[in-house]
Image (tube, rainbow, N blue to C red):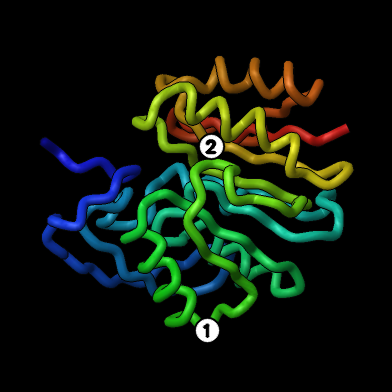
């Protein structure tokens, strides 16, 4: 049986890979491994999301990266927004260990990285919630990430999602409109949609 990146398998052999990548103008070093999402390089969807995020209308407050993997989105935003604390969560323990090591390797200290299934261990409220949701985990998980973000946003806080058109962007857009009363398609690039909603 093939191990999925949203599962944990202690038997999986390690295939560590280290590479550099520039995100939001910062050169960052990442180590990935087998059993994590997009181990070869930063996936295109995450890159488009990171570069699209505009903080000019995001209120003061912290950031939450749901499904952080080995850390590219959360760490890039933490490096860019040093006055904000960035919480990064995932269910994949190997990915979380890598995210912590990647934070240390890049001397990023304004992060808090821990295991949480969607929002089950999230108690705070955030100015910005971001996610490249685990499509293979199923529609229920993806919809939960989108809709339940509303309970964890500060007033006027924003939720940003990247999702491919063929993997459910139209239905995600409808859910965001239904949940928040607004949704913007910020960017479309090679089939990836960057969707943003603001808590009214």
Image quadrant where one finds the C terminus: top right
Question: Which residue: 38% across, 55% down?
Answer: 42
User: Relative to 175, does residue 191 appear above or below in the rendering?
Assistant: below
Question: Which residue: 75% across, 37% down?
Answer: 151
**In front: 145, or 158?**
145
How packed mark 2 is, by other alpha carbons closer than 10 Å (few <14, some 14-19, many 20 or more), is many
Please state the horizontal and vertical placement of residue 75, each as a whole percent of the image.
54, 66
Viewed as shown, does residue 200 lie left or right of 144?
right
Residue at which label 1 appears: 107
How packed mark 1 is, by other alpha carbons closer than 10 Å (few <14, some 14-19, many 20 or more), is few
Numbered mark located on residue 179 in the image: none
Question: Which residue: 69% across, 35% down?
Answer: 196
Please state the horizontal and vertical placement of residue 199, each as a whole percent of the image.
82, 35
Please state the horizontal and vertical placement of residue 3, each as a whole percent of the image.
19, 43
Q: CA distance from mark 2 to mark 1?
A: 27 Å
**In front: 54, or 95?**
95
Label 1: which secondary element = loop
**In front: 129, or 6?**
6
Label 2: which secondary element = strand
Numbered mark located on residue 162 in the image: 2
- Decide: marks 2, 1 in contact (CB < 8 A)? no
Please state the horizontal and vertical placement of residue 43, each as a whole percent of the image.
38, 48
């Amino acid at each position: 049986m093939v191990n999925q990146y949203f599962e944990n398998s202690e038997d999986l052999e390690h295939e560590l890979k280290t590479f550099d990548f520039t995100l939001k103008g910062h050169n960052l070093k990442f180590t990935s491994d087998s059993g994590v999402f997009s181990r070869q390089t930063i996936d295109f969807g995450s890159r488009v999301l990171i570069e699209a995020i505009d903080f000019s209308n995001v209120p003061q407050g912290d950031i939450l990266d749901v499904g952080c993997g080995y850390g590219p989105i959360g760490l890039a935003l933490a490096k860019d927004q040093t006055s904000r604390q960035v919480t990064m969560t995932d269910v994949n323990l190997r990915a979380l260990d890598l995210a912590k090591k990647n934070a240390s390797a890049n001397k990023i200290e304004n992060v808090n990285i821990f295991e949480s299934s969607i929002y089950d261990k999230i108690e705070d409220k955030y100015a910005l919630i971001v996610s490249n949701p685990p499509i293979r985990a199923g529609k229920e998980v993806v919809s939960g990430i989108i809709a339940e973000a509303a309970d964890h946003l500060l007033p006027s806080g924003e939720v940003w999602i990247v999702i491919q058109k063929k993997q459910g962007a139209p239905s995600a857009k409808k859910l965001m409109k239904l949940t928040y009363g607004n949704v913007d398609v910020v960017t479309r690039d090679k089939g990836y949609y960057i969707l943003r909603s603001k808590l009214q």
